[in-house]
Amino acid sequence: MVERYVPAAGRAAFTGLYDPIVALTMRERSWRPALVREVTAGLPPAATVVDVGAGTGSFAIALVAAHPGTSVIAVDGDRQVLRRARAKAGGQAVEWREGLAGELPLEAGQADAIVMSLLLHHLAPAAKEAALTDARRVLRAGGRLHIADWGRPRGAWPRCGFMALRVLDGFEGTSDHAAGRLPALIAQAGFEDPRVWRRLPTALGTLELLSAQRPASGGSADDQ
């Protein structure tokens, strides 16, 4: 069975509302700058960063502005949302590619860092596993994976909001997040030291910022 593609806003009709919804409900000004700082810390001068599930492109554009000289490749499966992203101020500095998590249009070892921001909860468990495994393939040895996504909701208000989000986005894809299993899934995909370094209560649940590393050596021949 082919998995249903889920647009950034959950429904294609809501795409134009995605940016204001995120800004209004998810404390965007708190976590996006923090994630940009985490991603860019320690990058080499001519680094390549891949934003998987880039949506309307706000994060990819912010990365380029924060770390001049970095090559940012933004990948999304939604042509409509990519058109919006390209048209944004600063969008000309980003390389936009159409593609899906789990089947990234990139070479093995091409990226110094990969970002998945509000992507994984849209994916069914098998697709989530494929996305993390393919991220490991695309990262160079020692490269970093950075994720912003929902964790186990903490507190009454985030629990209520997360239930509403699960109704919109689907219970299958959000089940691992509701149970707090995301760090374990990252480790199972072959990453080292997956850790949650920040949690933020929001109107739609508890947002977690996570980082992990592709091992600097070892692994199968297919990983090299």
Image (tube, helix red, strand yellow):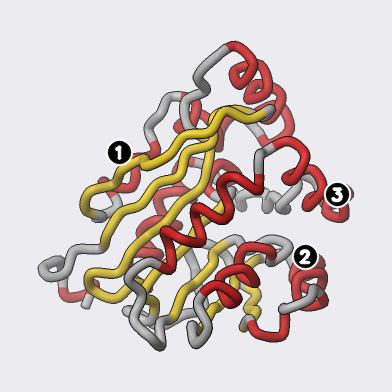
Residue 38 vertical placement versus 182 (above, below): below
Could you tell me which secondary element the residue under label 3 belongs to? helix
The mark found on residue 109 in the picture is: none
Q: Nearer the viewer, residue 161 or 163?
A: 161
Q: Nearer the viewer, residue 88 or 116?
A: 88
Side of 84 where 75 appears, left or right:
left
Where's residue 191, x and y in %? 26, 55
For the residue marked with disc 3, what is the amino acid? Leu
Which residue is identified by label 1?
184
For the residue marked with disc 2, what is the amino acid? Val
Side of 29 where 14 appears, left or right:
right
The answer for how far apart the CA atoms under marks 3 and 1 are is: 33 Å
Where's residue 55, x and y in %? 69, 61
Which residue is identified by label 3?
17
Q: Nearer the viewer, residue 46 or 113?
A: 46
The answer for how far apart the CA atoms under marks 3 and 2 are is: 11 Å
Which residue is identified by label 2?
81
Could you tell me which secondary element the residue under label 1 belongs to? helix
Residue most toward the top? 156
Q: Badge 1: few (under 14), some or many (20 or more) residues near its Cα, within 10 Å?
A: few
Residue 70 vertical placement versus 162 (above, below): below
| Quarter of the image with the C terminus in it | bottom left
Q: Residue at x 61, y 52 (%)?
A: 2
